[in-house]
Image (spheres, rainbow, N blue to C red):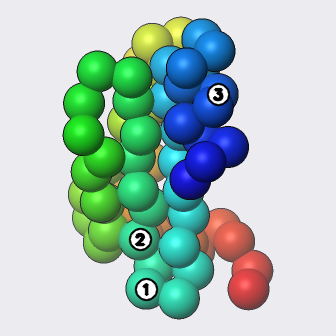
Amino acid sequence: IGKIVFCLQHGSQLGWLVEPQDRSVTIFTRDRLPEIKSGEDILPVLNCLTDWQLSARELFNWLVF
């Protein structure tokens, strides 16, 4: 979390903290409190990727743990 906050303070727009144990993704942005996404929740992406949609479930289906 500390590294994500550091990056946001230095210009990053978005950070994802992937939690494999509970299959959730905590979303960090500069202008909001963190949000937790899971299941069919759609993960936010950068503005340059607006045509791309990915749910938390799809992300975890792609990853091998």
Question: Which numbered tag is attached to residue 22?
Answer: 1
Residue at 65% of width from left, 68% of height from top? 62
Q: Which residue is mark 3?
A: 7
Label 2 SS:
strand
Q: Amino acid at mark 2?
A: Ser
Q: Which residue is mark 2?
A: 24
Q: Position of residue 32 (x, y in %)?
A: 25, 30
Q: Tell me the number on the disc at residue 60.
A: none
Neighbour class for label 2 at 10 Å: few (<14), some, many (≥20)?
Answer: many
Three-letter amino acid code of the residue under disc 3? Cys
- At x 67%, y 43%, the residue is 3
Q: Nearer the viewer, mark 3 or mark 1?
A: 3
Q: Nearer the viewer, residue 9 or 47?
A: 9
- Circle 1 crowding by C-alpha within 10 Å: few under 14, some 14–19, many from 20: few
SS for dot 1 = loop
Q: Position of residue 53 (x, y in %)?
A: 41, 39
Place of residue 37 in the rendered image (x, y in percent of width and height, measured from the top left): 31, 60
Callouts 2 and 1 close, C-beta under 8 Å: yes
Query: Is residue 35 depicted above or below 9 in this figure?
Result: below
Work out whether 65 lies above or below 47: below
